[in-house]
Image (spheres, grey):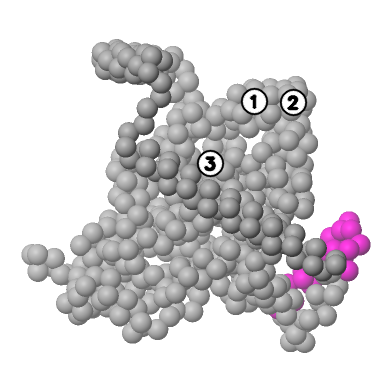
Amino acid sequence: MALPVMPFLRLVRAGFVMAREGVFGLVHLPDLPAAPRMAIAMARLLERRSVKAKSADLRLSDALNKLGPSYVKLGQFLATRADVVGKEAARELSALQDRLPAFDHEAARSAVAEQLGRPVDEIFVEFGEAVAAASIAQVHPAVVRDRDGNEHKVAVKVLRPGVSRRFKRDLESYYLVARLAERFHPPSRRLRPVAVVDTLAQSVAIEMDFRLEAAALSEMGENIAEDPGFRVPQVDWIRTSKGVLTMEWIDGRKMSDVEGLEADGHDLEALGAAVIQSFLRHTLRDGFFHADMHQGNLFVEPDGTLVAVDFGITGRLNTRERRFLAEILFGFITRNYKRVAEVHFEAGYVPADQDVDMFAQAIRAIGEPIHGHDASEISMARLLTQLFEVTELFEMRTQTQLIMLQKTMVVVEGVARSLNPNLDMWRTAEPVVGSWIKDNLGPVGKLRDAGDALGALARIANDLPFFADRIGRMSEELEKMTMSGLRFDAQTAEAIGKAEAHHSRSGRLALWVIAACAVASVYLLA
């Protein structure tokens, strides 16, 4: 396996930046083998003297900011896990979500004019300085005038210049790590690291096309039209393109400002529950969910309504996957671990040669410590470690279609716990999951499924004459082939002839090369 030079050098640079910023000094794993411990000790020799005066959280956030957009995404995930990285580190990492340095205002105006095909002053009445800057884009306040002459405030999201090229380079490095892991570390193959990076690459490509984000906002808006306490901004399609998204301006407080929400008189426990229940409702009912629901992407309006923005990353589940998810969650809620295990086998998440009762026992070991305890008494880091050990023990392969869901569930739970540290995840989820189970897996749901099956049979019956005609023609063709042999049309015969000629030339060339090598060998040995 040839080692790509540039991706490898970029990985070396990432390691060097982390070492210089003192990130490796944050690692405290007493059970780590001797070789990794020595590598970390050597990396710490590169630390800048000034980092020793920095807090642990500042070291990590500074390193991620210097490394660029894809590493900032990692920081955004860690910002939701105060129970894993600590409250101080989570607070500092939250800056990565909405307080990155903005790029030049004139560059933003130029990008908007280029994308929309007109000067900015013709498109907007006003176009202000950036008010939020993230890893992919930044947001500008602007004012538009409608056909009736009324003015409205909007938010204009502008893609960072060069970010697409930067992400592409970073993805090459991620692919390198994934391929090396699969080649030299057999246990990691079960986790399918290359497939995981494939999913990330597709997600990033979609996130950088704002027309797709606008479509996601529109679809979510239709799905939640009747939902209380949750909405999304309306899209201004006329002023939207691949690199520019214009939408309704949201007057609300960011969910990352917990102290401000409390000062506004909002019920933080109710907001935490609303975040989880809204996510589960979208996932189970619609099969379409916001897959980047961190605090920076959620606003709370004065009346308590949640408003979600930044739909660059979304996830989908088909009907079958939604049923499996609901049954697994409901099994944990009701402590029916045997059913949770059976669903894993039915879904194909666990190989069929494993023992279902042993798997149920392992699931119980994960689920039981959660029940009867609030979040403040549970070590999520230890729980995730135990879950990983179970998946390895039972040879469970990574399900790429569920990666986005798994990641978002962790993020959403982290957001809810930032509002309510004593959150009971299972009790909060029960109303939504239980209702979905009743409506879809109960008697009413079975009748609906039976109706869908009858409808499918009716459609098949309508198509039977076409199938019969096709089968009849295939039978005639097979009979002709039996009697006369296989015949090609002129174009196919010509293509085969060219291929054979090329193969013959290649073969003759190979023979001449072999002969020349043989003559040279005889000459050298003479």
Say whether residue 255 is visible. no
**Residue pointed to by mark 2:** 354
What residue is pinned by disc 1? 345
- Name the quarter where the N terminus is drawn: bottom right
Q: CA distance from mark 1 to mark 3?
A: 17 Å
Does 266 sit above or below residue 318?
A: below
CA distance for labels 3 and 2: 22 Å
Q: Residue at x 80, y 75 (%)?
A: 43
Q: Closer to the camera, 305 or 144?
A: 144
Residue range corresponding to the magenta coloring: 21-38
Q: Residue at x 67, y 55 (%)?
A: 179
Label 2: how many Cα within 10 Å (few below 14, some 14–19, many 20+): some
Circle 3: element type: helix
Q: Is residue 170 magenta?
A: no
Q: Is residue 115 left or right of residue 287?
A: left
Q: Residue at x 73, y 80 (%)?
A: 20
Confirm whether residue 403 shows in the render: yes
Residue type indicated by callout 2: Gln
Q: Amino acid at mark 1?
A: Phe
Measured from the top left, where is residue 375 in percent x and y? 67, 47
Residue 30 painted magenta = yes
Q: Cβ–Cβ below 8 Å for labels 1 and 2?
A: yes
Reading the chain from its start, which is encountered first: label 3 or label 2?
Answer: 2
